[in-house]
């Protein structure tokens, strides 16, 4: 358990929110390898200077894309 009672990976991605990579990984519980895989498979990551950000709606759209969803 993390400080303050937060459990890693127990958050919720909001469509209208922008996340730093560290915050995104903390909220989703994804590790770096899984995030890199998602990026290679089309997840949009925006870069400003040296900082990278993920828009919550981009992640939701990526999860719902036909190539991501397995039946």
Image (cartoon, rainbow, N blue to C red):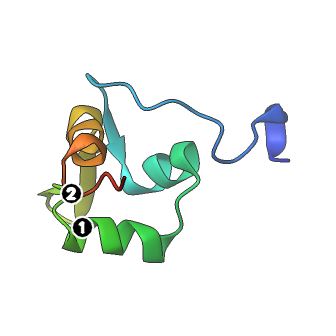
Determine the residue positioned at 16% across, 55% down. 44
Task: State which quadrant residue 45 falls in.
Answer: bottom left
**Around disc 1, counting alpha carbons within 10 Å, would you say few (fewer than 14), some (14 to 19), or many (20 or more)?**
few
Q: Splitting the image into 4 quarters, where does residue 5 fall?
A: top right
Using the image as rendered, state which of residue 62 and residue 25 is in the foreground: 62
Q: Label 2, on which residue?
A: 43
Task: Report how far apart the C-alphas of labels 2 and 1 lie in the structure.
Answer: 5 Å
Answer above or below: position of 27 versus 16: below
Q: Which element is circle 2 on?
A: loop
Say which residue label 1 marks: 39
Toward the front, the furthest residue is: 71
**71, above or below 31, in the image:** above
28 lies left or right of 56: right
Q: How many marks?
A: 2
Quick check: 52 above or below 28? below
Quick check: 26 left or right of 48? right
Q: Position of residue 1 (x, y in %)?
A: 85, 47
The reply to whether callout 2 and callout 1 are in contact (CB within 8 Å) is: yes
Q: Residue at x 21, y 39 (%)?
A: 61
Q: Is residue 28 left or right of residue 36?
A: right
State the image coordinates of residue 64 (x, y, percent, origin top left): 26, 41
Residue at position x 53%, y 67% in the image: 31
Q: SS at mark 1?
A: helix
**Left or right of residue 71, residue 61 in this image:** left
The residue lying at 51 percent from left, 29 percent from top is 12
Percent across and percent down for residue 16 are: 26, 22
Query: Observer-nearest residue: 57 or 45?
Result: 57
Q: Which mark is residue 19?
A: none
Q: Residues within 10 Å of mark 2 (few under 14, many from 20)?
A: some
């Amino acid at each position: 358990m993390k400080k303050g009672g937060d459990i890693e990976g127990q958050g919720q991605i909001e469509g209208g929110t922008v996340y730093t990579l560290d915050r995104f990984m903390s909220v989703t519980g994804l590790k770096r390898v899984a995030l890199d895989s998602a990026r290679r498979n089309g997840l949009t990551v925006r870069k400003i200077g040296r900082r990278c950000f993920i828009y919550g709606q981009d992640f939701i759209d990526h999860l719902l894309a036909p190539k991501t969803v397995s039946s």
